[in-house]
Image: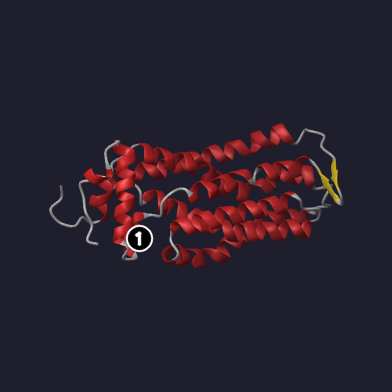
Amino acid sequence: MYTKPADFETAILASGYGKFNLILYMVSVTAGWSSIFETTTMSYVFPAAECDLELSLSHKGWLNAITYAGMISSAFIWGYLSDTLGRKKLLVIGYLLDALLVTISAFSQNFYVLITTKFLGGLIINGPFAALTSYLSEFHCAKHRARVQMIVGFIFSIGNLLLPILALAIFPLQINLQLGDWVFHSWNVYLLICSLPPLISGVAFVFLPESPKFLMTAGKNDKALKIFRQVYRLNTGKLEETYPADLDT
């Protein structure tokens, strides 16, 4: 038992490394893919959608760039919100909003709807993308923090491989589904499937705790201590009362 209030590094080290960290990695898979899908899908959609949407070369250029324009325009805002609202709120709201925007883009019937949703998608995804790395790092002690970055990089690489595999499986399908005024083709289905990772991520983060480091920074040490104890119980299988560190509450 520590004889004086612990700092963050001491507290997170005492919480151990185990099941909870594995849960974080599992949730990070769809979360990481969400960012890749938001920024990369258009490159695969163009060959299938150019006739349906009457896309010119200029249109394709704009669609490829507009997501990044949204990300650049919102970078400072999301950094501020992450440090004021907290990581969890940003992750939940950001991924669910992105899922909604990707779903709307899947029902696009013209260039203007598609480019609007892609810009807004870039503007939104930048928030959870930035918060995800901080969130994961703040649940790991210094010993394991480098491993987190390696795993996130691996997840992103798998996402980049998954997109062309999905395209290869879906685009050859002869889909011509009429839903009122909407005509649904294979590329619409492709985009609709791409809305699943952010949807799954947003729902998953609802059930995960706030970053204890953020809570400590906000002066909420009592809530941070409760989370440290919960993580300790999951990682070690021991009772929360045996958590060997304490915070100045």
Mark 1 secondary-structure assignment: helix
Image height of 85 relative to 55, above or below: below
Which of the 4 image quadrants contains residue 196?
A: top right
Q: Looking at the image, what colour scheme do you see?
A: secondary structure
Amino acid carrying mark 1 in the image: Leu
- Residue occupying image coordinates x 62% and y 51%: 99
- Residue occupying image coordinates x 60% and y 36%: 162
Residue 163 image offset from top left, x and y in percent: 63, 39
In the picture, measured across the screen, residue 84 lies left or right of residue 47, that is: left
Which of the 4 image quadrants contains residue 148?
A: top left
Residue 106 image offset from top left, x and y in percent: 73, 49
Frontmost residue, 241 versus 104: 241
Residue under label 1? 215
Image height of 2 relative to 216, above or below: above
Local crowd size for mark 1, using a 10 Å CA cut-off: few (<14), some (14–19), many (≥20): some
In the picture, measured across the screen, residue 102 lies left or right of residue 12, that is: right
Residue 142 image offset from top left, x and y in percent: 29, 47
- Residue occupying image coordinates x 70% and y 32%: 169
Frontmost residue, 161 versus 8: 8
Quadrant (top left/top right/bottom left/bottom right) for the C terminus: bottom left
